[in-house]
């Protein structure tokens, strides 16, 4: 996966003609931390997992990025995703560098108590390299506000009260209003901004969303609220399709109650195999789960003419090239899903100031940040006749490169 992100980086670096020195400084991570996470399970067995924290670049500010708990977590994935965070923070223009990490466990196999043990153990192992001015983790795949609360508590036990060490905390425990919906709402703003350029609106389009976790769930809600027709959604088990548009709020209620899409029944809605969601008829396809979804094998079968990357790294370079050559517009991850890190920034600022902002205030600030980032990327893409992804990387590399040169090696 790191090869993929490096490919996109080098493609943009070539367009910019940046020097070989800066390119070398920006390409590789600054620090890779790998730790053993050992716990005693409730049945007395010993369980050992591997945890990672990769800190890619902090030229523009403290490292920032999510922690995922998933069997696919390894050094390569964490490094690729950490680099994406560096570019994302720069495009969103929030004062951070990029990091990522996690633990290669499957939370579905752990009890709540075991999950807490794994989380606290990880913090004990990495507490020296994270901190409010050093590296600030956040939720990602399979991690949530409760896990962030344990991280804050464990870190604070070692270092003293430090709510700003992590973002995405529960609102009742120094979290920010609007952080839970932030990525999904940010994706909505990104789509809205793009469509406005073609004199279109969210309500004019049909949408398919792959993944119904935190991002897909809130995205479906916000699209639906604006009159967008969500015709298909999927999770790890199944996909639901209704060409006339799903009753999004009923689907969300079903997921709240049962945890999964499976078993949802409504007139006009059918279940199809999970991966078939990618090929349904729709205007906008939104991957909102894991990476590596679009490949050279399936790119030609995607019917949507607009792809919006709510997930990180869903498109391989081969698929990206196919989309570019065949008139499929891709709004890239480093722009489209930046709502999460933007509201994380708001949470961090509130923690440092010990002050609370209102939800409406957060939403309008998020809209402003996303709008500015989208305008910058879309304008550059038009001006230079390059893809949105290359334009986004050009903006990011320019900002991070400038900070690196100004700081000195
Ligand atoms: N995990 C999210 C992402 O990939 C959010 C990171 C953050 O808020 O720091 O962008």
Image: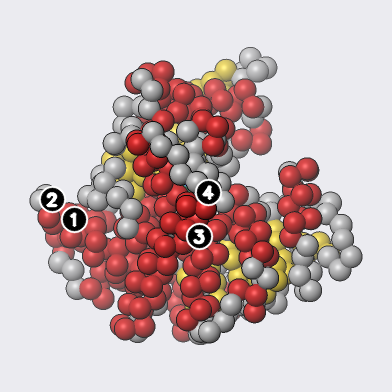
Crowd class of label 4 (few under 14; some 14 to 19; many from 20; radius 10 Å): few
| First-in-chain label (4 vs 1) | 4
Judge depth for marks 3 and 4 and give the one in front: 4
Q: Residue sitting at 26 percent across and 56 percent down?
A: 27
Q: Position of residue 207 (x, y in %)?
A: 65, 70
Mark 1 beta carbon near ligand 1 (under 8 Å)? no
Q: Quadrant of residue 269?
A: bottom right
- In the image, residue 214 sits, relative to residue 271, either above or below, namely above
What residue sits right under mark 3 in the picture? 186
In this rendering, position of residue 303 left or right of residue 59 = right
Mark 3 beta carbon near ligand 1 (under 8 Å)? no
Q: Residue sitting at 64 percent across and 79 percent down?
A: 204
Label 3, label 2: how far apart the Cα atoms are: 31 Å
Residue 292 shows in the view: no
Judge depth for marks 4 and 2 and give the one in front: 4
Crowd class of label 3 (few under 14; some 14 to 19; many from 20; radius 10 Å): many
| First-in-chain label (4 vs 2) | 4
What residue sits right under mark 4 in the picture? 359
Label 3, label 4: how far apart the Cα atoms are: 14 Å
Crowd class of label 1 (few under 14; some 14 to 19; many from 20; radius 10 Å): some
CB under 8 Å between discs 2 and 1: yes
Q: Which mark is residue 403?
A: 1
Disc 1 is placed on an element classified as: helix
| First-in-chain label (1 vs 3) | 3
Label 2, label 1: how far apart the Cα atoms are: 6 Å
| First-in-chain label (3 vs 2) | 3
């Amino acid at each position: 996966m790191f090869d993929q992100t490096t490919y996109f980086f080098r493609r943009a670096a070539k367009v910019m003609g940046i020097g070989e020195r800066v390119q070398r400084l920006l390409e590789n991570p600054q620090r890779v931390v790998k730790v053993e996470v050992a716990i005693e399970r409730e049945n007395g067995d010993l369980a050992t997992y591997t945890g990672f924290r990769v800190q890619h670049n902090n030229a523009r500010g403290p490292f920032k990025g999510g922690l995922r708990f998933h069997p696919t977590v390894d050094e390569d994935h964490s490094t690729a995703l950490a680099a994406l965070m560096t570019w994302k923070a720069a495009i969103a223009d929030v004062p951070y560098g990029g990091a990522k990490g996690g633990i290669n466990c499957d939370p579905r196999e752990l009890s709540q108590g075991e999950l807490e043990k794994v989380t606290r153990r990880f913090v004990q192992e990495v507490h020296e390299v994270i901190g409010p001015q050093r590296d600030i983790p956040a939720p990602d795949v399979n991690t949530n506000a409760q896990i962030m609360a344990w991280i804050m508590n464990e870190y604070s036990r070692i270092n003293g009260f430090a709510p700003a060490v992590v973002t995405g905390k529960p609102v009742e425990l120094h979290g920010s209003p609007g952080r839970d919906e932030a990525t999904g709402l940010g994706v909505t703003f990104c789509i809205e901004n793009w469509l406005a350029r073609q004199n279109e609106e969210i309500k004019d389009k049909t949408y398919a969303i792959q993944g119904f976790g935190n991002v897909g769930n809130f995205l479906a809600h916000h699209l639906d609220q604006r009159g967008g027709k969500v015709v298909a959604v999927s999770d790890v088990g199944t996909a639901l399709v209704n060409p006339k548009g799903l009753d999004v709020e009923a689907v969300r209620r079903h997921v709240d109650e049962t945890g999964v899409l499976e078993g949802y029944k409504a007139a006009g809605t059918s279940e199809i195999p999970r991966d078939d969601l990618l090929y349904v008829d729709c205007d906008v396809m939104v991957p909102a789960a894991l990476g590596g979804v679009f490949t050279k094998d399936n790119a030609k079968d995607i019917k949507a003419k607009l792809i919006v990357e709510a997930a990180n790294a869903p498109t391989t370079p081969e698929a990206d090239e196919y989309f570019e050559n065949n008139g499929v517009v891709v709004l890239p991850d480093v722009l489209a899903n930046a709502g999460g890190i933007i509201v994380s920034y708001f949470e961090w600022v509130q923690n440092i100031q010990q002050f609370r902002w209102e939800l409406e205030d957060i939403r309008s600030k998020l809209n402003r940040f996303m709008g500015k980032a989208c305008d910058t990327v879309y304008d550059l893409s038009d001006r230079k006749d390059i893809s949105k992804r290359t334009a986004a990387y050009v903006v990011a590399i320019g900002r991070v490169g400038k900070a690196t040169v100004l700081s000195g090696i």
